[in-house]
Amino acid sequence: MIRSNSCIRQSLTRLYVSKPRFASTTAARTNVPRPFEEERLPWYRADQFYPVHIGETFISRYKVVGKLGYGAYSTVWLCRDLNRASDFVSVKVCTNHGAASMGRDRELKLYEHVASLGSQHPGQAHIRGLLETFEISGPTGKHLCLVHPPMHMTLADLQRQNPSKRLNKELLNWTLFNLLGALSFLHYEANVRYTADNVLYLTDINPSNIMLTIDDDSLLPAFEQAEASDPLPQKFIDDTRTIYGSRKLGLPKDSLWGQPVLCDFGEARIGPGPHRGLIQPELYRAPEVLFDMGWDSSADIWNVAVMIWDLFQGRHLFHALDEDQDVSATHHIAEMMAYIGTPPPLEYLRRSQVTSHLLDEK
């Protein structure tokens, strides 16, 4: 099995050589003037975030033991499942911001759709599961919570840890095998297109949305113990709100790294297509997207190929910038043509009204 491939796990260990950084001081509550954690988000508003406190229990079941991180419209917490005392879960507490509701609805719809299939497709094992959802009431409204199996770091984290900013061939082969299996399930059995149409979310297929599962069961109790005995810094806001520092998980023992899996389905589409509209992060956009043609699952495959190239080379295949360093579809297409050596076939170009502004028939 791929999971037992010791060569790949040793490669992961070589990539992630630095030790997790834990605070050596007690968690002093300070009113520091600088933004801390989710406060750094340009659109941050405290009243939209639920004020989670370490030690509180959600729905009489999930006890918060520490903060794993935060996203554009959520914070993520490691919790102990009191119904299964030896189990831990990751709870994503969403904001009550209206802009995030469409993505949450799409993600929940995808999980409901997948659950209804009763599929035995092996690729389903390579997408992150959803255990349950619930709502909690905060000072300014209700907040949706998503319960997932805990995960380790993302491929983006691994890339940042490596001084060369590259990921090796063995790891990328492993990632590509799992990712294509997941897409095979989503495209051909679940009939889903995994895409993004709002650059603010950045939730397309990218290194930040591919995570490693946890095979070393000692990592989660160690996280809990470290937070209890040596808490990370906290920023005290008022009697109801404290912003906690995010803690990294430790390294797995005996190179017991888990599987790469696809996460975050807030911008997935369900349906056969073709779809239209601008999708994907700029550098991963497929030609049919840049030409404003109808797109389908092939756009995801282009996305994966460019991402894998970037991760292996430690730099971007495309830059898509004009002379003023602004994003430019024209320059992006020119880069593609330079690599391929010829323009796209004429019958392909005639499918788009955009190409007449970019290219002539010569």
Image (cartoon, rainbow, N blue to C red):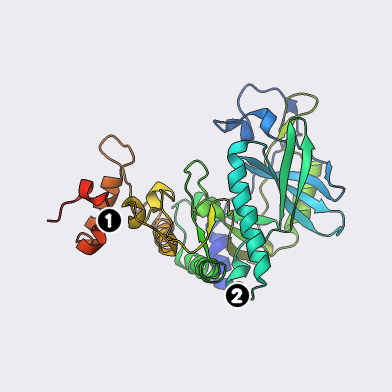
Query: Which residue: 39% across, 47% down?
Result: 282
Q: Secondary structure at mark 2?
A: loop
Going from the N terminus, do you reach mark 1 or mark 2 first? 2
Query: Which residue: 22% across, 46% down?
Result: 357
131 above or below 60? below
25 above or below 219? above
Dot 1 alpha-carbon crowd within 10 angstroms: few under 14, some 14 to 19, many 20 or more: some
Q: Position of residue 48 (x, y in %)?
A: 67, 32
Query: Which residue: 87% across, 54% down?
Result: 82
| Left or right, residue 101 beside residue 11 | right
Mark 1 is on which residue type? Answer: Met
Per the image, the residue denoted by label 1 is 336
Q: Which quadrant holds the N terminus?
A: bottom right
Per the image, the residue denoted by label 2 is 121
Say which of 49 and 291 sits in front.
Answer: 291
Q: Secondary structure at mark 1?
A: helix
Say which of 71 and 67 sits in front.
Answer: 71
Q: Is residue 56 visible?
A: yes
Nearest to viewer (mark 1 / mark 2): 2
Q: Which quadrant holds the C terminus?
A: bottom left
Q: Are circles 1 and 2 on residues that touch, CB within 8 Å? A: no
Q: Position of residue 222 (x, y in %)?
A: 76, 53
Mark 2 is on which residue type? Answer: His
| Left or right, residue 170 beside residue 358 | right
User: Going by the picture, which residue comes out furthest to the left?
Assistant: 362
Q: Is residue 72 visible?
A: no
Query: Which residue: 63% across, 63% down?
Result: 113
